[in-house]
Amino acid sequence: MEIINKKFSSWILVIAFFLFLIFFVTNKQDVWTSDVQVKNDQTNSLQKNILDFNKIQYVKIAGKILKVDLVLTQKTQEKGLSGREKLKEDEGMLFVFDYMGQYSFWMKDMNFPIDIIWISDDFKVVYIKKNATPESYPETFTPEQNAKYVLEVLAQFSEKNNLKVGDKVEFLSP
């Protein structure tokens, strides 16, 4: 009987050791996996954000729907509407930034006046620069509040449509 108990005890020790090993490795893997998962979630969130914005073609603001050109990269942000000859009344340019911030705009190489509308990450208008003219360059326009999006539209859009700070904005896909 004692021989059986020793064999049984040995097996229990071996099993306990393997269970401990499995538990230890599993927990270490979970910690590692959760760190990787957080990084993947952040990357996927950023990619999802970019992918979703690639689908946006319209902005609804002040009851009007505008067809927008998306500006997602630093290179296109620097160019903006510079050099463009015109913008139709139902068109705009939507700048999408990675983070909330106080983004400054100027009228370098612009050919027509515009309204510049800063929008928060909860899709509310936080600041409006009405009638920014090409002659104002090199002056820059910066909101007092942080914004994540900036919409450029023809001058007088804000006045004609009674747009004001706090108004809600929607981004639309076809």
Image (cartoon, rainbow, N blue to C red):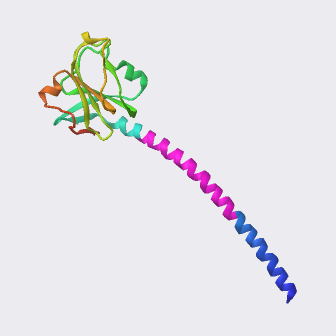
Position of residue 57 relative to residue 131, above or below, is: below
Q: Position of residue 50 (x, y in %)?
A: 41, 37
> Total of numbered circles in the picture?
0
Give the residue furthest to the top: 135
- Residue nearer the viewer, 148 or 56: 148
- Residue at 59%, 52% in the rendered image: 33
Position of residue 99 relative to residue 17, above or below, is: above
Report which quarter residue 165 is drawn in: top left
Give the left or right position of residue 78, taking residue 5 as reference: left
- Residue at 33%, 39% in the rendered image: 121
- Main SS of residues in magenta: helix
Q: Is residue 154 magenta?
A: no
Give the quarter of the figure containing the C terminus.
top left
Q: Position of residue 92 (x, y in %)?
A: 25, 26
Q: Magenta segment, which residues? A: 22-48
- Residue at 60%, 56% in the rendered image: 30
Report which quarter residue 123 is drawn in: top left
Give the residue furthest to the bottom: 1
Q: Is residue 34 magenta?
A: yes
- Residue at 23%, 14% in the rendered image: 133
Give the quarter of the figure containing the N terminus.
bottom right
